[in-house]
Image: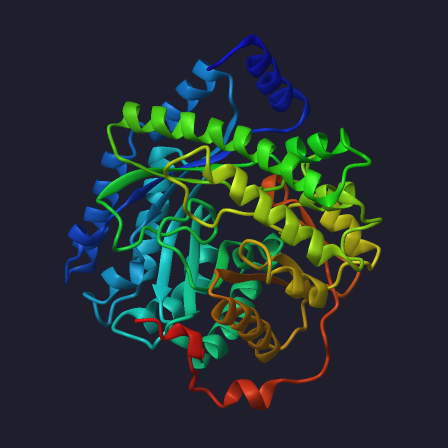
Amino acid sequence: MLNTFNILETIRMIQDQCLDIRTITMGISLLDCIDPDIDKACQKVYDKITSKAANLVRTGEQIEKEYGIPIVNKRISVTPIAILAAACPNENPVKFARALQKAADTCGVNFLGGYSALVHKGFSAGDLELIRSIPEALAETSNVCSSVNIGSTRSGINMDAAALMGKIVRQTAELTADNQCIGAAKLVIFCNAVEDNPFMAGAFHGIGEPDCEIHVGVSGPGVVRAAIAKYPDASIDEIADVIKKTAFKITRMGQLVGARASQMLDVPFGIVDLSLAPTPAVGDSVAHILEGIGLECCGTHGTTAALALLNDAVKKGGVMASSNVGGLSGAFIPVSEDAGMIDAAVNGTLCIEKLEAMTAVCSVGLDMIVVPGDIPADTISAIIADEAAIGMVNNKTTAVRLIPAIGKKEGDMLEFGGLLGSGPVMPVNQKSASKFISRGGRIPAPMHSIKN
């Protein structure tokens, strides 16, 4: 039941604490666009996306005016393009990327995700061609995002894919070196990727999803930080309760927006992803939440424990506010997109090894981390493999989004602007993992994956 207090509280959250709907994302199946003629397939892709999402941006803007709730991004996710590319052998998949960019321009969306391949157990038709085309595709387009799933708890880790993706990440950065290596910021490598993720750059529309649906991704780190600040002497379990209640309020708003968007667009309501997604804006930082819990600086000892508390409380509180929770749901820790993470990385408190430990207890993984431009491809592959191992063994989604800063060294900065923020070049271990990566093959699935 809404009352004056609830309404005023929400207004304060929006005006003073950076509360927003981070994204409404329309998922669109392209399975009926498959055609052996790649030009015909691309035209079908363009036609279907622009038909289904014709009113997406307008609807988001109407909801913003109707409820006074900021919706930062309007996005589209599509069927992994490698599936469509499989029907067009000996053709350049970049044609699909161009069609996706044209559709994104027509619809006016911020990002379009799904230039993707799922290769956790091996490469099927179309996969290698698409993966090898990623650097060119992301260099040629501005709104298209790409992802590759290289492992899962049920299948293990495809180390041939991990080795290849180290090279692809580096090539993508090199092809966009004149634009802050932005291509690599649009590429995610997953383990246990989910089919209903509304967040970029890893969003794609899974083959188990309906023909078209609408997802919502909520945010609100500033709201959680402000709530914690009211209880400076609370115990840990009391802090957890405060976070749960706050996450409920944040997710309730996402449920409202998702239901309204579904009604206006006449498509099914998919999920609310109740992740805490930070921005570079002051006061909108996951790192500052952890510091509010009692850490002098994010990255110091105790950070992983505090993050585990936060992530668990967010999920427990948010799940009660929606019957459609999904996606990644938890707390993101992207370095360049979080003002507190940036500060901690610059002063040396936060390092890649600590971030890796933190990813065992939070959403996703090593996200938006800038590394020296001379980093070898096999070192990138080894970082990808480490993160995939955390996801595989812990039966959770993990990911890597590294940006090799071509021509820059430790201590320099890359300036992306917007939600992507700026990233300090972080040091990486100089010892080689080349022999390990070059072995290839597959790391077997853990014993606990055998559940049937």
Nearer the observer, 227 or 90? 227
Residue 341 visible (yes or no): yes
On the image, the x and y values in percent for residue 229 come to 76, 32
Q: Is residue 307 left or right of residue 84?
A: right
The residue drawn where x is 70% and y is 39% is 239
Q: Quadrant of residue 185?
A: bottom right
Residue at 14% over, 63% down: 36
Taking the view exactly as shown, the residue that stands out farthest to the top is: 4
Position in image of residue 331 (x %, y %): 58, 47
**Can residue 405 be seen in this snapshot?**
no
Quadrant in which the C terminus is drawn: bottom left
* 406 w.r.t. 209: above or below: below
Note whether 128 is above or below 349 in the view shown.
Answer: below
Colour scheme: rainbow
Quadrant of res 293: top right
Give me the residue at 48% from left, 61% from top. 396
Nearest to the observer: residue 212 or residue 307: 307
Residue 104, horizontal then vertical, whole percent = 37, 40
Q: Position of residue 91 (x, y in %)?
A: 25, 67
Q: Nearer the viewer, residue 37 or 193?
A: 193
